[in-house]
Amino acid sequence: MSAPTTSDCNQDAARAHGSSLQRLVGRHSWCVLIHGDCRDVLHEMEADAVVTDPPYPGREDLFPTDSVWTVLRAVQAKWPAFVFWPCVPDYPCGTPDAVHVWHKSIPIHPRSQTGNVAGHQYERILSYGLGKKCEVFRVAAIIPNFAACAEELEKHPTQKPVALVAQLTERTKAATILDPYMGSGTTGIACIRTGRKFIGVEKDKRHFDNACERIRRELEGALL
Ligand SMILES: C[S@@+](CC[C@H](N)C(=O)[O-])C[C@H]1O[C@@H](n2cnc3c(N)ncnc32)[C@H](O)[C@@H]1O
């Protein structure tokens, strides 16, 4: 596996915007991880598809959402994409070709106002240019003290299960996948497990460092 080159993801552009960068290379895949604001680097990125889980409107207590609409519109204009999206707000960037349901397969909590321990029972995955068939993905959510995904849990408040995201990366048929809202790097892990190359951007230094460490471990252990 050859290392990513400058043209693979415009690394100079990322540096010019003050973003720092990690290149991690395994036997069968590589990942380029950028610490910075995706708005600064997105227009220069090269990839075949986007799989992303942006900050959700209505959850500004977790992450600022000011970038989301602009970024998702730019993504939709340039790449086929799977975009995680909550069950209530309107679509962020035009009517999708398909709307998948992520059924979180979690127990009902009797004292929860929303009906279960994690909030809503499902989230949506919007498909732009990646097929018109609507599907339901049943994969247990990652919740502290919930055994189904306990061994996967990182220090990120909205971490998605690799088993779910890997089904999306697999469906893209793309060689290189971009996630402008990388978080703890789940899309990167899914890319390695499904034989894709990965470019991820994350603004928060703690989450960026966590993603680097997690993806490094995965690349070292990958038996693809
Ligand atoms: C919903 S989380 C993604 C979680 C990820 N799917 C995972 O499994 O860990 C969204 C992430 O986007 C990051 N973020 C928010 N605004 C950003 C921006 N403008 N550029 C890059 N990252 C940003 C947040 O720090 C957060 O970690």
Image (spheres, grey):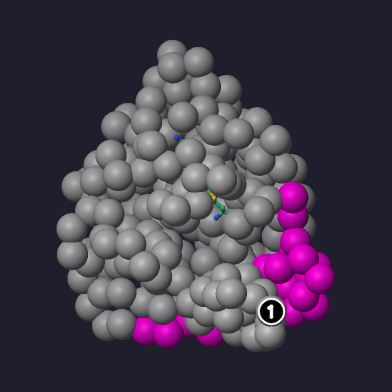
Q: Name the residue rendered at 30%, 74% in the picture.
A: 99
Q: Is residue 154 found inside the magenta-colored segment of the image? A: yes
Residue 210, quarter of picture: top right
Quadrant position of the C terminus in the picture: bottom right
Q: Name the residue rendered at 22%, 66% in the picture.
A: 96
Q: Name the residue rendered at 64%, 49% in the picture.
A: 184
Tell me if residue 112 can be seen: yes
Residue 123, quarter of picture: bottom left
Say which amino acid is labelled 1.
Answer: Arg
Q: Which residue is mark 1?
A: 111
Q: Taking 176 as reference, is 85 above or below it?
A: below
Q: Taking 110 as reference, is 199 above or below it?
A: above
Q: Is the CB–ligand 1 distance for label 1 below 8 Å?
A: no
Residue 217: x and y in percent read 76, 50
Residue 39: x and y in percent read 37, 31
> Horizontally, is 118 left or right of 103 in the view?
right
Which region shows up in magenta? 135-155
Residue 134: x and y in percent read 31, 82
Secondary structure type for disc 1: loop
Q: Is residue 202 found inside the magenta-colored segment of the image? A: no
Tell me if residue 176 can be seen: no
Judge the density around disc 1: few (<14), some (14-19), many (≥20) Cα neighbours within 10 Å: few
Q: Taking 223 as reference, is 205 above or below it?
A: above
Residue 100: x and y in percent read 36, 77
- Closer to the camera in the image, 201 or 7: 201
Residue 223, quarter of picture: bottom right
> Horizontally, is 126 left or right of 164 in the view?
left
- Closer to the camera in the image, 216 or 115: 115
Count of labels in the image = 1
- Closer to the camera in the image, 178 or 146: 146
